[in-house]
Amino acid sequence: MVAACFLVASFSWGLGLFGSSVYLQAITAQHGWAVAQVASAITLFFLVSASIQRIVGRSIDRWGPRPVLWTGTVSMAAGVALLGQVAALWHLYACFVLIGVGWSTLSTTGISATVTPWFERHQGRSITLAIMGASVGGILGVPLLLFALSRLGIGPGLAVAGLTAACVLLPLIGWVLRFRGPADLGLQRDGDVSSTGIAPTPANPPIATHANRRVLLWSAAAGFALGLTVQIGFITHHLALAEPLLGTAGAGLLISATGGAAFIGRLVLARIVDRVDVRRLAVTVMLIQTGALLAIALWPTAPPVLIFASLAYGYAIGHVTTLGPVVVRREFGAAAFGATYGSAATVIQFTSAFGPALLGLLRDGFGSYGPGLAIAALATFTGGLALLLGGRRALR
């Protein structure tokens, strides 16, 4: 289950989140449309995804992952393939609606809701390893997309990318993800074989109660919403930000290295996540991101600063993307996780959907990325503060 979700995440992040930076650069170059116009279409992709997060979580809780993830795969593959055929702005928006439906099912909510019923003692590690496929999507997705577009052109290149995703994911989901939980195989969580029917004792019992559940859930939603708004905006504009200093090839390598840093971050997280206070860990990595964004804003023409700050930011990406569902799973438990996290994910994605457009507007308004990145650093710091204060208030 974890390995299958890992592959799903690789394609989802490669063609969805990380691929958006390639689409932004290629479509603006192909059609001459303004960066803000294309970035707004990418924002629509995240808004569509946000609007159905709770439905995705509830559907997986009720019917299992296979029909939900099948639907998402077909939608994302079609959206990516058709993206290379657009001739008008409304075509572009229609394609990103399809990609948004796919992203909603194949990203954090869909993957974590699929994995959660299978684990208790290793709840954090299992979600982390599954979502680690996102780093593979970041490492390989952008260079492969750039290679396909350079050799085949934007139309055939994106058609091949969409078709490849469909051919790999549809049979994989149909074969592996047909089970709703370990009970279908006569097992308990974590693969335990038990004749008593009693689930293993949680290593970290949930702390949510009737009195503090709202504070826990909505402080997590607010904190990760701010952090991921900036994160998605940065990832979307990373290629455009780096290309003037490093060239197209150098910028592509930097994006791959940033994805590699996120992969390392997730490897470290997988080793420690079930033994640490995950909320405080999220605050720490958001402080790292704040410093990285400020460095790029203060020294916008220094390639070494851009490279080092991008790698530091990428390491934190591996934590922030994963820790949202881990925090909710740790604090609320496995029961109805899909619906619970789906509620938080709706807020997170509705807010973060504006990341690409906001950073694009700031860039166009100020004439450079520096001031916008300084504002983004402040937003990230505020997100970490919301997580910290929300956790303290809930414990009180």
Image (cartoon, rainbow, N blue to C red):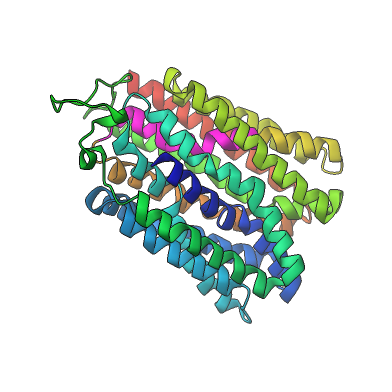
358 w.r.t. 320: above or below: below
The segment highlighted magenta reads 314-334
Q: Is residue 227 left or right of residue 121?
A: right
Magenta stretch encompasses residue 13: no
Front residue of this view, candidates 386 and 355: 355
Does any portion of residue 34 appear in the rendered image? no
Does any portion of residue 254 appear in the rendered image? yes
Front residue of this view, candidates 257 and 376: 257
Residue farthest to the left, as pictured? 196
Q: In this view, does 393 lie to the left or right of 180?
A: right
Q: Which of the 4 image quadrants contains residue 313?
A: top right
Specify the principal SS of the magenta part: helix
Q: Which residue is drawn at 62% across and 81% down?
A: 88
The quarter of the image holding the N terminus is: top left
Q: Position of residue 187 (x, y in %)?
A: 23, 33
175 w.r.t. 45: above or below: above
